[in-house]
Image (cartoon, rainbow, N blue to C red):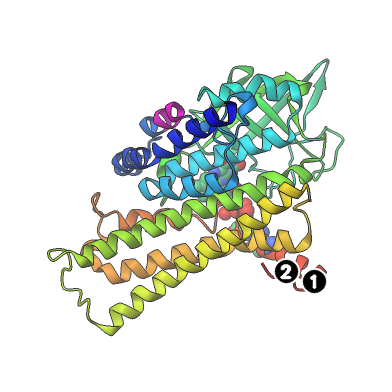
Amino acid sequence: VVTGDLESRLSLARAAVPRLTELLAAEAASVDTEGAFPEAGLAALRDSGLLGLLVPVEHGGLSGTLTDLVQVAQELAGGCLSTAMIWAMHCQQVDTLVNFAGSELRERLLPRIARGEVYLASVTTEAAKGGHLLTSSAPLRESGERLALDRDAPVVTGGRHADGFLITMRASPEAAEHRVSLVYADRDQVALEFSGGWDTLGMRGTQSIGMRITGAVPTDQLVGPPGGFRTVAVEGMAAVGHLAWSACWLGAARQAFGDLVGLMRSPGGRQGVDVNSDLVAERIARARLDLELTSAYLNRVREEVERLRADGSPLGGASTQIHLNTLKVAAAELTFEAVDRLVQLSGLARGYRRDPDFPMERRFRDLRSASLNYANDRLLTVTGRLCLMDRSVDLA
Ligand SMILES: Cc1cc2nc3c(=O)[nH]c(=O)nc-3n(C[C@H](O)[C@H](O)[C@H](O)COP(=O)(O)OP(=O)(O)OC[C@H]3O[C@@H](n4cnc5c(N)ncnc54)[C@H](O)[C@@H]3O)c2cc1C
């Protein structure tokens, strides 16, 4: 009975995704223009149960899989890439809690997430050290039964709207920068001071603002071992992030491609594009090739991660890490390249000019963020070193 109930709740939530995607699409132009947070989109996601997609059924969630995550992320991103990334990053944090939080924190927090009450934000970037995931400068300080924190956070997606934060901190004032702890803070346990805006080229709806977070949390809100964030990142947060972000970028580029094909097939929409031209055909084929390669590699790496997790095997092996990093870098580059080609094909009137009904230029601006949203350079330099350890050249 419980399994049947879960299946029907999961399929109801999945069935709501096309309607949600339409709602996100309707809000996308205004959040982009105004740099506003997609409040209607997040409210609908809360109501849909999808904030709890990865929460296990025993905590009231949908016990969704990484396959579900990747599919839903792609669909939502067809409506609005900013909102899809907000949701995908939230799910990335949920997966981290499910796999690494202690049982007391899981029992307190996961049912609230499943009910749509808690939207989670991520705090890893820091002014002193930039984007580097595996170091932190601001220390956690023990104060009785609590852990005190004072953290600058220059880029926090949805920071103003989040109900909880997963924050990387140096393990203690004496610890080296690479001894990083991950800690959960509920919004009402901390004081938030917002600074700076988010006036960016793209991903404007993520409202990834700067903030300072101060306060103290109970010691059981450490997620993973003290100073042991590297394991949490490698076995969970970064792996799921790369899958979910790549799915979002692919979903946005795929929708742009579908929109252009639709336009070219409509008698009034061609606007001087000769669909019988070999040059046009070659250009469409090249954009499709970028999408095909991203989709195939995403599914291949997702299968590898699901298989290893099901076997209880680590994701930290050199070849799996190479595959996960390669996925992020390739998806960032290929989806942007595909939309760049589509802008050229669409021309000035349809591709380059701002048009809320045919948002090619918004997708182009949004996808330009992909190689920065965790710098491709950082991943490539790690991957290059890992390649020297993988003598068997174990390809995905
Ligand atoms: C849409 C969006 C949402 C985001 N949301 C969040 C969020 O919610 N929470 C959060 O904490 N952060 C968030 N970030 C920040 C993100 O995680 C990265 O920290 C940030 O994008 C990196 O900034 P940066 O380009 O200055 O690169 P950094 O990683 O700070 O690096 C600075 C420069 O050095 C280069 N570089 C780095 N390492 C090397 C190397 N080994 N060799 C050569 N060059 C190198 C980089 O390419 C870059 O040009 C978000 C970013 C974006 C774009």
Within 10 Å of disc 2 (Cα), the crowding (few <14, some 14-19, many 20+) is few
Within 10 Å of disc 1 (Cα), the crowding (few <14, some 14-19, many 20+) is few
Residue 187, percent across and down?
Answer: 58, 21
- Identify the residue at image location x=53%, y=42%: 88
- Identify the residue at image location x=67%, y=57%: 304
Q: Camera-side residue: 294 or 383?
A: 294
Residue 164, percent across and down?
Answer: 59, 26
> Residue tagged by mark 1?
388
- Identify the residue at image location x=12%, y=64%: 268
Residue 46 on the magenta segment: yes
Which residue is situated farthest in the front direction here?
A: 1
Q: Given the image, on which type of amino acid does mark 2 rest?
A: Gly
Q: Given the image, on which type of amino acid does mark 1 rest?
A: Leu
Q: Camera-side residue: 386 or 77?
A: 77
> Mark 1 and 2 residues: CB-CB less than 8 Å, in contact?
yes
Name the quarter where the C terminus is drawn.
Answer: bottom right
Give the numbered dot on residue 384. 2
Q: What is the C-alpha distance between the residues marked 1 and 2?
A: 7 Å
The secondary element bearing badge 1 is classed as helix
Q: Camera-side residue: 207 or 137?
A: 207
Q: Camera-side residue: 161 or 40?
A: 40
Lateral position of residue 304 relative to residue 364, left or right: right
Bounds of the magenta span? 42-48
